[in-house]
Image (spheres, coloured by chain):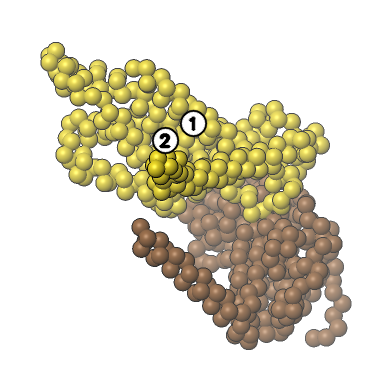
Chain colours: A yellow, B brown
Amino acid sequence: MHDEIRESMLKKSKAAKRELFGKIISGLAILLIIAIVASIFIFVASKGIATFTTDKINLWDFLSKTVWNLSVKGANGQPEVGALAMIVGSFVVTFLAAILATPFAIAAAIFMTEISKKTGRKILQPVIELLVGIPSVVYGFIGLTVVVPMVKAVFGGTGFGILAGTFVLFVMILPTVTSMTVDALNSIPSDYRSASLALGATRWQTIYKVVLRAAMPGILTAVVFGMARAFGEALAVQMVIGNAIIMPNSLVTPAATLTSVLTMGMGNSVMGTLSNNALWSLGLLLLLMSLLFNVVIRKIAKKGGKF
Amino acid sequence: MQKKHFGFLGILVLAAVLSGCGLKQKGEVLNAVGSSALQPLVESAGEEFNKKYPDVYVNVQGGGSGTGLAQIQAGAVDIGNSDLYAEEKSGIDPKKIIGTKVAVVGITPIVNKGVKVKSLTLKQLRDIFLGKITNWKEVGGQDLPIVLLNRAQGSGTRVAFEQLVLNGQQPLNAQEQDSSGMVRKIIASTEGSISYLAFSYLNDTVKTLELSGFEPTQKNVTTNAWPLWSYEHMYTSKKPTAMTKKFMKYMMTSEVQDKIVTKMKYIAIKDMKVTRSIDGKVSLIKQSSK
C-alpha cells in the first residue's frame, strides 16, 4: 500500500527529467563554447609562436624593432620582423580615441540621466543604440570620403594617418562608452542624490561630487571597454590610417596598426611561411591584449564592488 | 514553442531543398582565386565560357597572388591566378602545380593629375621610390613634395615593380594600400602623389608617365620598349578536372586571346616579340610568321 507513494517519490517526475534534459543541453552548450575558445587560442598561439621557434626570430626584436620587411633579409641574415611601429600605432589611436570620447560620453550620459531623463530616454537612447549597430565598414567608408579629405584640408599632409583613425574610432566607441556610462550612473541609488541635495548641495555639486565619484568604477569600465573595441577594430582603421609601417612621428602622416597590417597582408602570404607566421604573431599579440583589457575590466569591477 | 520549432525546421528543410536544386541547376562550378590584376580577364573569359557551356559556372575571386598559389597548392580551388611564377613565392612547391602563361600585363607609374612631369627615366623612377628624389622639381616639375604610395608587401604588382624598377630592393617605407582600386582613388585625390598600376586598372582620373620617352601602350610592351610588364599565370593541379582543362584550353583560343585580352588592355602572349625568363633576362623571339 505504501509502495505506490514510495515509488512515486523515488521515481523521477516529469519535471525532474526535463530539468536534467535542460541541464545536459546547457552543459553541452557551455562545453562547446569552451572548446571553441580553447581551440582558437591554441591555434593562434601555436601559429604565432612559430615565428619565434620555427623561423628563429628574436622575440625582443619583434617587440622592439620598427622595420617590418618580411621578404628581404636584414643585416643579421634574417628577415626583419619588427612590430614596434604597429604596436605604438595601435596604442596611440586607441588612447587618443578614448581620451577624445570620454568627456563627450560622460557629458552625454549626465545629460541623459541627471538633467533631462525624458529626452534622454526618448530620443538619445535610441540614437545611441542605433550608432552602436552601424557596421564598422560604414564608419570606414565615411572616414575615407569625409574625414580624410577634412583632415587633409585642415591639418595638411595626405589626410591619412593617426588623426583620421582617431576621429573614426572616436565616433565608433562614443556610443559604447556613453551607453555603459549611462548604465553606471543609473545604478547609483537615488538616496545619494537626495541626501546630497538635502545637505544643501546644488545639482552640479551633487553630480560632480557624489554621482560621478560613486559611478567612477563603472565609468572606467566603460572607457576600457571602448578602448578594447578601438584596439581590435580593423577595417575602418585600415581604410583611413594609410598603412605605412613607420614609427609615427606626426598625427597626419600615414601610420599602421596591428590590425591594419594583418588585414593587408593576409591575401599575399602563404600558409606556413614566415610572412604568414609573422601575421599570426600579430594576431596572438592582439588576442593577448584583449585578454589584458578583460582582466583590467574585471579588476575595476571588483574594486567597484567594495564601494 | 512547438509551432516555432516546426517553423524553424521547415525553413531549414526548405533551404536544403532549394540549395540542392540550385546546385543541380548550376551544374559544375570552376573556382578560380588569386591575383587581382588578372581577375577582370578571367571573369570576362568565364562569362563567355559560360555562354558556350551553360552548365559550367566560373567563379572568380581576388585575394592576391599568394592566396591563389596557396589555395591551388592545397587543392582547395580549381585554378590559382598569380602575377608571379610559383618558383618566386616562398612556401610554394612548383612541382606540385602546373602553370600556364595566359597573358602579359603592363604596369605603369601613375601620378596625380596636378603633377607637371611628363616623362621620367627608369633611374629617376627608381630614385623616387627609394627616397633619393623627394620633390618633383628635381625631375623637371613644379616645387611639390613627392608622396609615395605602395601596394601591400607581397602583392604581385608590387613584387613585379620591385624587380623591374628597383632591382629587387625594397621601396621607401610609405603608405600602402592593398587594392588597385584604392591606389587609383588616392592618387586621384592626393597632390604630388605617385604609385603604380596595372594597365587594366587605368582610367582618366589619374595621369600616366612616359618612361624615357615611351608611352605605356600595349604595343610598346610587346617590344619591351616599355619594360614594366609581367606575365599572368594560371595554375592548376597536376591532375585537373576535365572541365578545368577545357577552360584552360579556352583561355588560349583566339576567341579569348584576340578579343577579350586586347579589349581589356592586357597583351596576348603570342603578340610578344620578346620573352623574359624567370631570372629577368629579356630576349627577342625569332619571328617566323607575320
Locate residue A176: give its quadrant.
Answer: top left
Taking depth in this image into account, of B209 and B180 the one nearest to the observer is: B180
Q: Where is residue A172 in the image (x, y as percent from the top left)?
A: 39, 42
Q: Where is residue B132 in the image (x, y as percent from the top left)?
A: 67, 42
Residue with the most extreme top position: A199
Q: Is residue A84 left or right of residue A157?
A: right
Q: Which amino acid does label 2 sit on?
A: Gly
Count the numbered circles shown.
2
In the rendered view, would you say A74 is above or below B219? above
In the rendered view, would you say A235 is above or below B108? above
Taking depth in this image into account, of A189 and A10 the one nearest to the observer is: A10
Residue labelled with disc 1: A294
Q: In which quarter of the image is the N terminus of chain A?
A: top left
Label 2 marks which chain's residue? A
Residue under the image location 65 percent in, 69 percent down: B31
Q: Is residue A218 left or right of residue B11?
A: left
Residue labelled with disc 2: A226
Tags 2 and 1 in contact by the CB under 8 Å rule?
no
Locate residue B255: give its quadrant.
Answer: bottom right
Q: What residue type is labelled 1?
A: Asn
Residue under the image location 70 percent in, 36 percent down: A49
What separation in Å lies between label 2 and label 1 (alpha carbons)? 12 Å
